[in-house]
Image: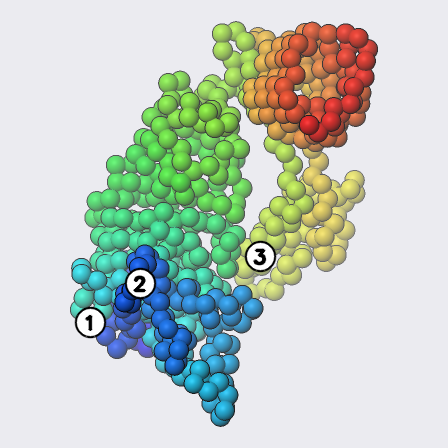
Amino acid sequence: MAAAEEMVFATHGAKAQEVVARALAAPVSLAADQVREVSPGRSQAGEVWSPQLLPYQSWEGGAARAGQVDGDADGDLLAAGSLGMGVDDDARARLLAMAARQKGVGGAAAVDVPDEQDAPAVSVQREEAGYALVGFDLRALARASGAQSGLAVVLPSFVDGVPVVRIAPGAFARRLVRGVGVDVRVVPDTVQRIGAGAFSALPGRHIHLGAGVRAGGAQACDLSGVTPPLERRTYSVSGENEHYQAQDGSLLSADGRMLLFCAPPYEERYALPDGVETIGETAFAQGCEPPHVVSAPACLQHVRAKQWDAALWMCPAGCDGARRLRRRGVRVCGPDAIEADGCWFDCRDGAALLVAGPQPPKSASKRFASVAARARAAAASDEGVAVDAKQAAARAEANDCGGLVSGGRLGPVGQGPSAAVLAQPQVAETLALPAQVRGAELTRIAPSALPYAPKTLIIPASVREVGDGNACRGTKRLVLPEGLERVGAHSFCSRTLEGPVALPKSLRSVGEGSFEFSVCRLACSGVEVHVPAD
């Protein structure tokens, strides 16, 4: 039990740096009888199988016993099937134990279930360089500590004097960590490799990497996909680590050229760290609002993560990454782009280009989720006073809506947040693009600049071309000017356009998929046509 108290304990509001210093000052060392040692799977005679698969064991004669499958227990069909039916590990163990005690039930298939409370919470596997951590029952250790949130988790450094050098991908399986709130997770200096996705199910706000980590693996982060949900995640790295560094909670390679994780939450306008050349596939967290505008350094070359493809990327001239982003349909502009009324314009050679229009309003589900998150935070931060979640949500939504709901003031707070949450925030219903932007004539609308547009969209007579992908979802009334010559593919296809839409005489080309389900009037002949889905 003393070892469990060293691995999992309450932080009592201490800062992450203090918890990390305490953990590194006294590394956790476990005895051989405090862990469950498993053996790697080996194929039987006549079998050919991949080493990544769980070992095959015959079910005849009770040879396969529940809870005794080597490796990651997530591969156990019995455990996976039970979880799928809503039966957790504790309930499954009780049911199996009950069946084993009943005479005449199960026969030879009856299983001998060990006492789950006495079973070690840490599972390891012996390797050539040391031990690999393959299982960490955080739920059991949290119960032993007497707390379920605000915990610090310190991974063991040694087992019977042998260092722990690797963390397996399934060491923190969802069934082992769900429901436990972790403030700080400390990876000791002995660990050299971390399996890909090892921390994906971990509800940890801060992760510290020790000095020995040289292969961290891709660690995808979904703030809303873990239990309990997270509002942030940050990293810190030992000053002696030669492979990684941390900047403002973000994780980068030691030379600063590769961004491995960008610490959320993100502001509406986000600037990437200077010197970043490559952005990893899991660098951007999910489950939170992405930025609307991203400022990139001139040295940026590759952006492998795609979670921010809907944002506007501001890239200096000559940036190789900008060319690759444009190739996959991301909106890109220069660092001198001009913002006006929620729209962004790029001015080049005396002409202006619309690169991004106003942001679409949040859906009802996203508004409800954000309000609920703020309500939970308000209730948790209230000192000694029980705050009703509905009241906190109503206050939060009142701030977003300016205190107005459907033209009237919010009612008493105790009435709940439903009306406030479902009320659509006030947004502009008309977008009239300017003919000139700081003396430059607006001549083009870039591809995908207007995936969304307000109910009424007015395009000025100076515009000659509308690029591909300007769907203008949300638009009902569209005004196209005389002088417009080309409309790209899949544009103005909101399916809600009120017709007939007047197509000017100057229009020479309309791409496929545009004006879908709309009635259009050809100004050159006066003929009205209905555009089908194909």
Q: Nearer the viewer, mark 2 or mark 1?
A: 2
- 456, above or below 440, in the image: below
Query: Tag 3's secondary structure?
Result: helix
Where residue 91 appears, as percent x and y from the top left, is 51, 77
Q: Nearer the viewer, mark 1 or mark 3?
A: 1
Name the quadrant of the N terminus.
bottom left
Q: Is residue 36 left or right of residue 66?
A: left
What residue is disc 3 on? 376
Q: Nearer the viewer, mark 2 or mark 3?
A: 2
Where residue 71 appears, as percent x and y from the top left, is 34, 65
**Residue nearer the viewer, 291 or 497:** 497
Amino acid type, mark 1? Asp
**Residue nearer the viewer, 227 or 37:** 37
Q: Which class describes the residues within 10 Å of circle 3: few (<14), some (14-19), or many (20+)?
A: some
Residue 157 shows in this picture? no
Query: Tag 2's secondary structure?
Result: loop
Q: Which class describes the residues within 10 Å of circle 2: few (<14), some (14-19), or many (20+)?
A: few
- Which residue sits at x=64%, y=30%? 452
- Which residue sits at x=51%, y=81%? 95
**Residue nearer the viewer, 404 or 487:** 487
What residue is disc 1 on? 160
Where residue 181 appears, as percent x and y from the top left, is 46, 62
Amino acid type, mark 2? Glu
Image label count: 3
**Residue nearer the viewer, 317 or 273:** 317
Give the CA separation, mark 2 to mark 1: 35 Å
Of label 1 and label 3, which has the lower sequence position? 1
Residue 47 is labelled as 2
- Which residue sits at x=35%, y=67%? 56
Amino acid type, mark 3? Arg
Residue 350 is labelled as none
